[in-house]
Amino acid sequence: MKLIGLKSAIFDVLTFAQDGAAPAGGDAGAKGPAVNPLVEMAPMLMMFAVLFYFIVMRPQQRERKKREDLLGQLKKNDKVLTVGGIIGTIADLSNDGSRVTLRVDDGTRIKFTRSSIQGPYSENSETTG
Protein backbone atom coordinates (compact mmCIF):
# COMPACT_ATOMS: atom_id res chain seq x y z
CA MET A 1 0.00 0.00 0.00
CA LYS A 2 2.82 2.41 0.86
CA LEU A 3 4.60 1.65 -2.42
CA ILE A 4 1.59 2.78 -4.45
CA GLY A 5 1.39 6.00 -2.42
CA LEU A 6 5.10 6.63 -2.96
CA LYS A 7 4.78 6.06 -6.71
CA SER A 8 1.85 8.45 -6.98
CA ALA A 9 3.69 11.08 -4.89
CA ILE A 10 6.76 10.87 -7.14
CA PHE A 11 4.55 11.05 -10.22
CA ASP A 12 2.75 14.13 -8.83
CA VAL A 13 6.05 15.89 -8.08
CA LEU A 14 7.43 15.16 -11.54
CA THR A 15 4.20 16.25 -13.23
CA PHE A 16 4.09 19.47 -11.19
CA ALA A 17 7.73 20.16 -12.05
CA GLN A 18 6.99 19.75 -15.77
CA ASP A 19 3.80 21.83 -15.72
CA GLY A 20 5.26 24.62 -13.57
CA ALA A 21 8.39 25.19 -15.65
CA ALA A 22 8.26 28.39 -17.66
CA PRO A 23 9.97 28.62 -21.05
CA ALA A 24 13.33 30.39 -21.17
CA GLY A 25 11.91 33.31 -23.19
CA GLY A 26 9.74 34.41 -20.26
CA ASP A 27 6.46 33.94 -22.14
CA ALA A 28 4.50 31.48 -20.02
CA GLY A 29 1.78 31.00 -22.64
CA ALA A 30 3.98 29.82 -25.53
CA LYS A 31 4.98 26.19 -25.53
CA GLY A 32 7.53 24.57 -27.80
CA PRO A 33 7.25 21.16 -29.39
CA ALA A 34 6.87 18.30 -26.92
CA VAL A 35 10.13 16.51 -26.22
CA ASN A 36 10.18 12.78 -25.69
CA PRO A 37 11.03 12.07 -22.03
CA LEU A 38 13.43 9.31 -23.10
CA VAL A 39 15.46 11.85 -25.07
CA GLU A 40 15.69 14.07 -22.00
CA MET A 41 16.74 11.15 -19.80
CA ALA A 42 19.21 9.63 -22.28
CA PRO A 43 22.28 11.58 -21.09
CA MET A 44 21.50 10.71 -17.47
CA LEU A 45 21.03 7.04 -18.32
CA MET A 46 24.28 7.01 -20.29
CA MET A 47 26.09 8.60 -17.36
CA PHE A 48 24.73 5.94 -14.97
CA ALA A 49 25.73 3.17 -17.39
CA VAL A 50 29.31 4.48 -17.64
CA LEU A 51 29.48 4.95 -13.87
CA PHE A 52 28.15 1.40 -13.31
CA TYR A 53 30.77 0.02 -15.69
CA PHE A 54 33.70 1.73 -13.98
CA ILE A 55 32.52 1.12 -10.41
CA VAL A 56 31.15 -2.43 -10.70
CA MET A 57 32.06 -4.23 -13.90
CA ARG A 58 35.68 -3.20 -14.44
CA PRO A 59 36.99 -4.09 -10.95
CA GLN A 60 35.11 -7.39 -11.12
CA GLN A 61 36.76 -8.20 -14.47
CA ARG A 62 40.19 -7.37 -13.00
CA GLU A 63 39.60 -9.65 -10.01
CA ARG A 64 38.40 -12.49 -12.26
CA LYS A 65 41.46 -12.12 -14.50
CA LYS A 66 43.80 -12.12 -11.49
CA ARG A 67 42.09 -15.25 -10.10
CA GLU A 68 42.29 -17.05 -13.45
CA ASP A 69 46.01 -16.24 -13.66
CA LEU A 70 46.53 -17.47 -10.10
CA LEU A 71 44.70 -20.74 -10.74
CA GLY A 72 46.55 -21.20 -14.03
CA GLN A 73 49.92 -21.03 -12.25
CA LEU A 74 49.19 -23.85 -9.81
CA LYS A 75 51.68 -26.69 -9.96
CA LYS A 76 52.51 -29.84 -8.07
CA ASN A 77 53.75 -29.41 -4.47
CA ASP A 78 52.19 -25.93 -4.07
CA LYS A 79 50.58 -25.45 -0.67
CA VAL A 80 47.05 -24.08 -1.16
CA LEU A 81 43.91 -23.12 0.72
CA THR A 82 40.49 -24.18 -0.56
CA VAL A 83 37.34 -22.07 -0.36
CA GLY A 84 36.13 -24.51 2.30
CA GLY A 85 39.17 -23.80 4.48
CA ILE A 86 41.10 -27.02 3.82
CA ILE A 87 44.85 -26.56 3.65
CA GLY A 88 46.77 -29.04 1.53
CA THR A 89 49.57 -29.62 -0.92
CA ILE A 90 48.84 -30.27 -4.58
CA ALA A 91 49.62 -33.92 -5.24
CA ASP A 92 48.29 -34.17 -8.79
CA LEU A 93 46.66 -32.09 -11.53
CA SER A 94 44.31 -33.71 -14.01
CA ASN A 95 45.26 -33.80 -17.69
CA ASP A 96 42.57 -31.29 -18.66
CA GLY A 97 43.46 -29.08 -15.70
CA SER A 98 39.96 -28.98 -14.23
CA ARG A 99 40.65 -31.14 -11.16
CA VAL A 100 43.27 -30.92 -8.42
CA THR A 101 44.18 -33.66 -5.96
CA LEU A 102 45.32 -32.32 -2.60
CA ARG A 103 47.40 -34.23 -0.08
CA VAL A 104 45.92 -33.15 3.24
CA ASP A 105 47.68 -35.61 5.55
CA ASP A 106 49.81 -38.73 5.19
CA GLY A 107 47.74 -41.04 3.02
CA THR A 108 44.78 -38.63 2.78
CA ARG A 109 44.05 -37.21 -0.64
CA ILE A 110 41.01 -35.19 -1.67
CA LYS A 111 39.98 -34.26 -5.21
CA PHE A 112 38.73 -30.72 -5.88
CA THR A 113 37.81 -28.73 -8.92
CA ARG A 114 40.41 -26.10 -9.75
CA SER A 115 37.89 -23.33 -9.06
CA SER A 116 37.58 -24.59 -5.46
CA ILE A 117 41.11 -23.42 -4.73
CA GLN A 118 41.12 -20.01 -3.05
CA GLY A 119 44.82 -19.42 -3.48
CA PRO A 120 48.31 -20.22 -2.27
CA TYR A 121 48.76 -20.69 1.45
CA SER A 122 51.64 -19.60 3.62
CA GLU A 123 51.91 -20.03 7.38
CA ASN A 124 52.45 -16.31 8.00
CA SER A 125 49.30 -15.31 6.03
CA GLU A 126 47.06 -16.99 8.61
CA THR A 127 45.28 -14.42 10.78
CA THR A 128 44.77 -14.95 14.46
CA GLY A 129 41.19 -14.45 15.76
Image (spheres, rainbow, N blue to C red):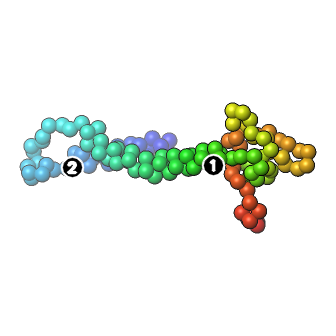
- In the rendered image, the quadrant that contains the C terminus is bottom right
Amino acid type, label 1: Leu
Q: At which x and y percent is residue 35?
A: 20, 38
Question: Front-most of 124 and 56?
Answer: 124
Question: Front-most of 67 and 25?
Answer: 67
Residue 21 horizontal side relative to residue 104, left or right? left
Amino acid type, label 2: Gly
Image point (69%, 47%), residue name: 74
Q: Residue furthest right?
A: 107
Q: Are marks 2 and 1 in contact (CB under 8 Å)?
A: no
Q: Is residue 9 visible?
A: no
Q: Which mark is residue 51?
A: none
The tag earlier along the polypeptide, 2 or 1, is 2
Residue 27 horizontal side relative to residue 71, left or right? left
Q: Residue furthest top?
A: 96
Image point (70%, 41%), residue name: 114
Instruction: Give the residue number, with chain letter if any, for mark 1.
Output: 70
Instruction: Give the residue number, with chain letter if any, for mark 2.
Output: 20
Question: Front-most of 15 and 33?
Answer: 33
Residue 127 vertical placement versus 66 (above, below): below
- Of badges 2 and 1, nearer the viewer stands 1
Q: Secondary structure at mark 2?
A: helix
Residue 20 horizontal side relative to residue 4, left or right? left
Cα separation, mark 2 vs mark 1, equals 59 Å
Q: At which x and y percent is residue 52?
A: 43, 48
Q: At which x and y percent is residue 82?
A: 74, 48
